[in-house]
Amino acid sequence: MPRMILLGGGVCGLATALMLARDGHDVTLLERDPAPAPDSVEAAWGWERGGVPQFRQPHGLQPLAHRVLEEQLPDVRDAIVAAGGQLANPLAFMPPTIADRTPRPGDERFVSLSVRRPTLEQAIARAADAQPGLTIRRGTAAAALLTRGMNGSSHVMGVRTDAGDELVADLVVDAMGRGSRLPGLLADAGLEPAAEEAEDARFIYYTRYFRGPAQPQPRAPRLTAVGSFSIVTLPGDNDTWSVTLFVAAGDRPLKRLRDTGAWTALVRACPRHAHWLDGEPITDVLPMAGVMDRHRAAAPPATGVVSVADAWACTNPTLGRGIALGLAHAAVLREVVRTRLDDPRALADEWRERTERELAPWYRGCVASDRARVAEMDAHRDGRTPPPPDDPAAVLRTALFAAMPYDPEAFRAGMEIIGCLAQPEEVLARPGLAERVIAVAEDARDAPPMGPARDELLRLVA
């Protein structure tokens, strides 16, 4: 029986381990955090997950994530729903500014899953705990890689744990997330690490969670840009929801948003979002900063080890793509392992090629979006006119998202991109769509503002 070692027991590490174990592999998962999965959703919120700094920050499963779970791990999808996760189609909650709400063929592809990260991880961890062929060792980390030569190059054949155990495997999978220690482990073994590019996304997030008898209905897109800040509203599980304000790092006056009073005043001043305050606050304002956009080669020069999900590439969480793309990446690995496990070099080559072809465009799109939004925020902060998009494709993307709140076809097109169902280039190439969104976006220029201008913003948070 082929043996696999998974490093990292977050959502995507657990999902990868489940997929591989269900294909008949002997899987050992090493998770540095020692605490086991709690027995209840209530206890999951207090789960000590020091290795996951974003554990209590907002999460949601985009349509792509729901589709992968439905196809690859349907019982896990059902367990998340049983724990209180909500299946919902965003087309049922289009902004009231869209008059034509007639269903279209294919609308079912937009179904998503609303759930907080602790609830999600608890459900998938309990499924993993019960999975035959999968051994989870919590409180255990990889201290070193075991290597040997193979066909003139280096090959990773397993790991040595921090307890001193040597575990040999046919494949080591790095699922250690944003803080992956694989580059250091490769260097300690005298191996060349995967090429890496990284930059600070330059966003700071301020989030608060609420609970109520009924979740608020959207009156604007989930992610709304308002001058020098943006606002994100996300439903959760068990009658909870979150509201997040995010700003550019370096905008010193807006650091006051960590104060509950300033945060509340700003949300209340956003006419299409203020009703999201109509619930019982269940947290204070939760800040998060220092988020990186980072990309590594999916397979380092050595064979026998690959990186999956955030350990390969991570972006700031504003677009909510991390888990969706991570689960899709895990499904790709499952396919590659099925056909290439007996040839380490062929496995590494196909894994690298498919990752770059199928997943990397999403990463590059996120980075471009981050840079453009930060430039807008900086301009509003400094009293300058925001720079226009710098190429025709960016002009179309900007027009599409401006048109989304006002046109049903633009809304669907935007949701395909937001939900990671289709790349912007594919969507905007459809006959007649570009002309339509440009016309709607032109009309939308006279729409009322979504929130306060800069002068009023500064007064609110003072």
Image: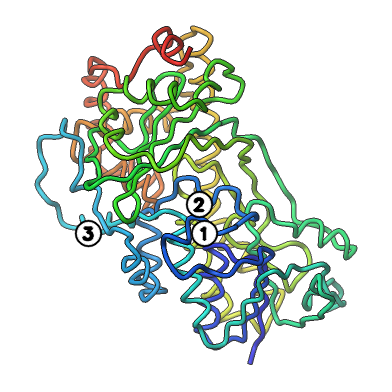
Residue 83 point in image, percent of width and height:
35, 66
Along the horizontal axis of the image, is 164 left or right of 348? Answer: right
Q: Earlier in the sequence, mark 3 or mark 1?
A: 3
Q: Nearer the viewer, residue 113 or 315?
A: 113
Label 2 Cα crowd, 10 Å radius (few <14 / some 14-19 / many 20+): many
Determine whether 250 is above or below 308 in the image. Answer: above
Give the residue at x 24% y 53%: 89
Could you tell me which quadrant the N terminus lies in?
bottom right
Mark identifier at residue 322: 2
Q: Quick one: SS at disc 1?
A: helix
Q: Quick one: SS at disc 2?
A: helix
- Mark 2 and mark 1: span between their CA atoms? 6 Å
Numbered disc in front, either 3 or 2: 2
Residues marked 2 and 1 touching at CB (< 8 Å): yes
Dot 1 amino acid type:
Gly
Along the horizontal axis of the image, is 313 left or right of 227? Answer: right
Dot 3 amino acid type:
Glu
Q: Quick one: SS at disc 3?
A: helix
Along the horizontal axis of the image, is 270 left or right of 250? Answer: left
Identify the residue under disc 1: 326
Residue at the far bottom: name it.
1
Give the residue at x 50% y 43%: 317
Mark identifier at residue 406: none
Along the horizontal axis of the image, is 430 left or right of 101? Answer: right
Residue 394 point in image, percent of width and height:
43, 30
Identify the residue under disc 3: 108
Residues marked 3 and 2 touching at CB (< 8 Å): no
Determine whether 119 is above or below 246 in the image. Answer: below
Q: Nearer the viewer, residue 281 or 194?
A: 281
Residue 264 point in image, percent of width and height:
38, 25
- Mark 3 and mark 2: span between their CA atoms? 22 Å
